[in-house]
Amino acid sequence: MKIAVTFENGQVFQHFGHTEQFKLYEVEDGKVVSSEIIDTNGSGHEALADFLAARGVSALVCGGIGDGAQAALSASGIEICSGAAGEADEAVAAFLRGELVSAGVNCDHHDHDHSEEGGCGGSCGSCGGCGGHSVPAIEGPNVGKVCKTHYRGTLNDGTVFDSSYERGEPLEFVCGVGMMIRGYDEAVAKMEVGQSIDIHLTPDQAYGYPDPRAIFTVAISDLPGAEDVNVGEKVVLYTSAGQPMQVTVAAKDEKTITFDGNNEMAGKELNFHIELVEVQ
């Protein structure tokens, strides 16, 4: 399996259509065995799909990407994981651990010119027009910037399910490109450094609702090692494209095992206390 990452100075470059370099990772048995940096030689947008396909790439990790490029990559059989940021090597490691969730089409408007009204008007080569977005773009002065936040997440009964305070370091992400759940992204987009807020998110603003299609049953005899796992355990399976997928063992009998690929927070209302520490 070969994974490509939009690349600049060791980081995940945030504009697929304008990337000048890719870092290619050769992966065997879920581990990186080699890597190389290649120049795109002026290729851009949809043409990059052919560029990657010709080099045997089966998966792409990137920042922002639009409709046209996504369609071209999909047509070439290349899996896309958008919305990544930070160090390229760590992004690939997270991808292989099944920790990256693709943001889908997320054309970034913050770092290149569009029409005077501020919309792309169909002229943005990487998205083919903003009418293709499935959800409204997140707006705010922090969109497209690296934000560091401390947070505490609780359920409606007060149970703390996650907290950066306990880990002792803030969470770092690029605001507005799909790295975070939408409600969190929207809140941080409009915050000022030093500000703290409390928000309540419905499932559609957080991890969505459980998808019955993400629950599937297989024969234990068809899955080596399945006989050793128990209900409630989290395991990593691999798709036909070689991408890892974390699932929970939902049920098991003598012959079959049922997995649930839904996020454990799917369908739940969430509360966050957020403190914006830094914006770069």
Image (cartoon, rainbow, N blue to C red):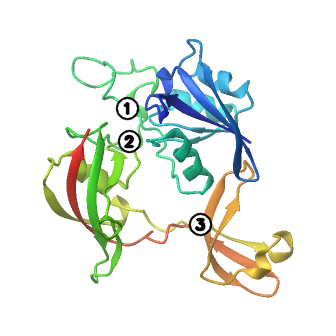
Q: What element carries label 2?
A: loop
Q: Is residue 226 above or below residue 16?
A: below
Q: Which mark is residue 88?
A: none
Residue 61, given in percent of the width and then of the height, sits at 56, 39
Whole-percent x, y for residue 237 in the image:
69, 63
Name the residue nearer the viewer: 263 or 10.
10
Q: Which amino acid does label 3 sit on?
A: Gly
Residue named by callout 1: 108
Packing grade of label 3 (10 A; few <14, some 14-19, many >=20) is: many
Residue type pointed to by label 1: Asp
Q: Residue 261 carries which label?
A: 3
Determine the residue located farthest toward the right in the rendered image: 221
- Residue at 73%, 26% in the rendered image: 55
| Disc 2 target residue | 177
Which residue sits at x=47%, y=28%?
A: 9
- Contact (Cβ within 8 Å) of mark 2 with mark 1: yes
